[in-house]
Image (cartoon, rainbow, N blue to C red):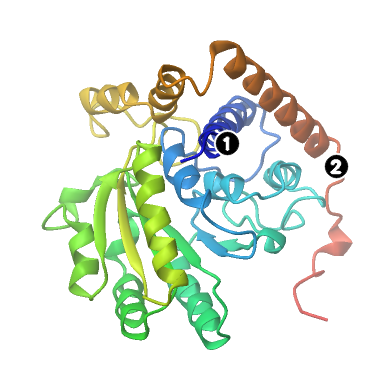
Amino acid sequence: MEKSKLIEMYKTMQLIRLIEQRINDEYKYDEIKTPIHLSIGQEAVAAGVCIHLRKDDYIFGTHRSHAQYIAKGGDIKKMIAELYLRKTGCARGRGGSMHLVDPDVGILGSSAIVGGSIPLGTGTALASKLMNNDRVTVVFFGDGAVDEGTFHESLNFAALKKLPVVYVCENNFYAINSHQLSRQVGDNIYKWAQNYGMPGFRIDGNDVLEVSDYAQKAISRCRRGEGPTFLECLTYRWKGHIGTVDDVGDGYRPREEYDYWVSKCPIKWFSEFLKDTGVLTDEHIKNIDQEIYDLIDEAFNYAQNSPKPSPDELLNFVYAD
């Protein structure tokens, strides 16, 4: 991969991390009214996939989709304003963290319903095939979503019709606090896709280079009209299911497991790789970080100073004109 793309992926990962850390820090002031679901620790998945998507390609996310929104090029100011439920938000203050949308860059929405985005993304892939264009849809979801019937129905239909869709399962092993092995007989989600007749792969979701490699091949396969691909990306969220807690300890996630995955920080590994290969220096990284901090400050100032919707606007945008 060319140097510029490597740097772009690093910037995207660091932007996701620092924005979510800022959200985590600001949440205690109770000005962000929407529930939040952070994906700190999972940045490599969105960055490695979206680097290969065009502006007019589609993505769908879940209740935990800040990373996908950012990686696809969503408007950062509008995203933060949406968390504050302001009129300038990407959903005009009506969606909050779990319903980010930016159609101008192919982000057609995210759904808080577990597995809810999977049939929607399958539908846009069907539309792309019927319209005979080469737009690709990527659907992001967690390991909990594969327990839903819509997952199986969608994969079967996509394989049957050879739809241009890439299914990306961010397997962080937990649905809220329920471990994968307490919900599923095995730990072989990717094999379910193979049984439906599409290529399925399990990859290291904390290695952005591996994610990028598999995503590029899957997206190219879609553009050639060869049908869908399934990527199970093994990763781990550092924060709890919702909010700013950690969900670590008795009855939750084991401390040893948590510490192991934190030691596998995807950004730390990638930054060391880029320095070792001469792509970045410490000074370059410092400058990138400062640019990101300035961007984040600007976005939060914009959001905090944006107007709130008024009660007489409650029914606006409920119906199409």
Q: Hey, what amino acid is under mark 1? A: Ser
Please state, as top left, top right, bottom left or bottom right, where the C terminus lies in the image: bottom right
Q: Nearer the viewer, residue 210 or 105?
A: 210
Q: Nearer the viewer, residue 84 or 197?
A: 197
At x 59%, y 33%, the residue is: 15
Residue 210 occupies which quadrant of the picture?
Answer: top left
Query: Label 2's element?
Result: loop
Q: Is residue 162 above or below residue 41?
A: below
Q: Is residue 291 above or below residue 136?
A: above
Question: Which residue is denoted by mark 1 in the rendering?
Answer: 4
Whether residue 115 can be seen here = no
Q: Nearer the viewer, residue 226 or 163?
A: 226
Q: Residue furthest top?
A: 283
Question: Which residue is denoted by mark 2 in the rendering?
Answer: 306
Q: Hey, what amino acid is under mark 2? A: Ser
User: Residue 22's x, y, as percent?
Assistant: 62, 27
Q: Image check: 79 left or right of 37? A: right
User: Residue 287's x, y, as percent?
Assistant: 66, 17
Q: Residue furthest bottom?
A: 130
Residue 205 occupies which quadrant of the picture?
Answer: top left
